[in-house]
Amino acid sequence: MRRWIVAEFAAPETSLEAARRLRASGLTGLDLHSPFPIEGSDEALGLRPSPIPGAVLCGGLIGAGFGYWLQWFCNAHDFPINVGGRPLQSAPAFVPIVFELGVLFGSAAAFFGMFVAARLPRLHHPVFEADGFRSASVDRFWLSASLGPGDDPEHVRARLADLGALRVEIVPEENP
């Protein structure tokens, strides 16, 4: 069974410093919960850069390529009609559709990529069961960590108390 440990802090600086020190000591699965974004939390938690910009770029390029191919196929290959001696494949005339499909596919990649990157929909997390966790959206700063099989919960609890935690709680996860 997977266990979580959560600690409440009064100030964002103390929660950020606790995250840095716990990460340096080798604890994994750290997350900060706060009423506003804390500058430097990405670095303190060791988060990788978001994959969303790459997904948007790929989606936009695929959409633009598809738009150009579709217009070329319809106008120059499948049903060519020579009207007034104009070229069948006219790139300047294709620009609006290419742009619009690039934007459409890029935004769809951002929308669906965000769900995949955030592992949504997850409607419940075990740390929500901690007493007082609702204050994370009001005025308190919470640090959560998933405890592996080799982690001693009492040692982590004592370490968090030394780092300035107001309250530390161990929360078991119902579904392994």
Image: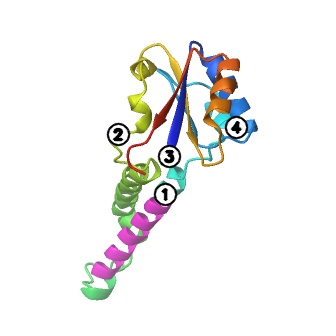
Q: Give the label on residue 23, or none.
A: 4
Residue 62 lies in the magenta stretch: yes
Range drawn in magenta: 57-75
Q: Position of residue 116 (x, y in %)?
A: 42, 54
Lower position in the chain sequence, tag 4 or tag 2: 4
Going by the numbered disc 2, the residue's amino acid type is His
Which residue occupies the extreme right position in the image? 24
- Depth check: give the residue in front, 145 or 158: 158
Residue 109 lies in the magenta stretch: no
Lower position in the chain sequence, tag 1 or tag 3: 3
> Which quarter of the picture shows residue 26?
top right
SS at mark 1?
helix
Per the model, the C-alpha gap separating discs 1 and 3 is: 32 Å
Per the model, the C-alpha gap separating discs 3 and 2 is: 15 Å
Q: Is residue 104 left or right of residue 81?
A: right
- Depth check: give the residue in front, 39 or 101: 39
Q: Which residue in the protein does label 2 denote? A: 124
Callout 4–callout 3 Cβ contact below 8 Å: no
> Which quarter of the picture shows residue 168?
top right
Callout 1–callout 3 Cβ contact below 8 Å: no
Q: Which residue in the protein does label 1 denote? A: 55
